Amino acid sequence: MDVTLANFEREVLHASREKPVLVDFWAPWCGPCRTLGPLLDKLERDYGGRFRLVKVNVDENQELAAHFQARSIPLVVAVVNGRPVDQFTGALPEGQLRSFIDRLLPLPHEEEHQRAVAAWEASDTDAAEKHLRTALSLDPGYDEARLDYVELLIATSRPEDAKAQFERLSARIKADPRYAALETTLNAVEQAQELPEEDEMLARIAKDPADLQARLELANKRIARRAWAGAMDELLEIVQRDRGFQDDIGRKTLIAVFEMASAQPELVSQYRRRLSALLF
């Protein structure tokens, strides 16, 4: 497929989030390009769609050529998840091309994980769960997929299953911000099951606006049902009234909620600014 500056973002950057994209910078007058091009076409067919091949005519797309510093052609740039990750110049033999491509391709469990993410983004939670379970059966230690599985189980109101999966995560993943976010969510869901209805906590707050325990309980109730804005309002109020309350739990929980609500970047950005204004 030929790409230009007009469709490069869609056909290369966005497409590379689903599979690796090879960008072949070429020109009609370039002899090695005429050797490499058909070989890349053949490999795209041989690999059955596991990577995508696009072509950029440098004579007609000088801005793109300059951006990728295509001083010598053919130049092939590999793009994965929106970023250039590798490249080569010249007409390589087929064996070296296969080695180059193989380094870019995800392993089977990673491919299942990618399918799960795509299904979830399309709101097909059943398919997402199926792919996540397959990914974890192929590699039980694949923590990144298990994190997504925990989040999916929480989102589909299965907290006990989510907790069981969470407990199977390895120690190495604890540094991932999502780990803390999911731990906070699971704790909130667990506590919410034992808490009274929100109206009762709202009544306590109306009677005594400084009842920070009531505000924390209300925030947990709202986290459990993924009402992020309402939860963050209460947590900000706790931070404003008493940073030291329960070892700064308002701020710590708020940071975790930012991660949980990452699918709503404008909302998170708004509350990050409000938190910064309180702290600094």
Image (tube, rainbow, N blue to C red):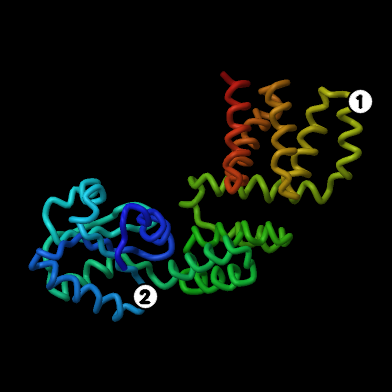
The answer to which image quadrant residue 57 occupies is bottom left
Going by the image, does 199 lie left or right of 1? right
The residue pinned by badge 1 equals 207
- Residue 240 location in percent, x, y? 69, 22
Going by the image, does 13 lie left or right of 219? left
Residue under the point 21% across and 50% down: 62
Estimate how packed mark 2 is, as few (under 14), some (14 to 19) or many (20 or more) residues with alpha carbons within 10 Å. Answer: few
Residue under the point 65% across and 37% down: 253
- Residue 238 location in percent, x, y? 72, 27
Residue that sits furthest to the left in the current view: 31
Above or below 132: residue 219:
above
Amino acid type, callout 2: Gly
**Between marks 1 and 2 in the image, the one whose residue lies nearer the viewer:** 2
Amino acid type, callout 1: Lys
Residue placed most toward the observer, 234 or 101: 101
Residue placed most toward the observer, 90 or 151: 90
Going by the image, does 154 lie left or right of 39? right
- Residue 124 location in percent, x, y? 62, 67
Judging from the image, what secondary structure is the residue with disc 2 in? loop
Q: Which mark is residue 9?
A: none
State which quarter of the image contains the C terminus: top right
Above or below 15: residue 249:
above
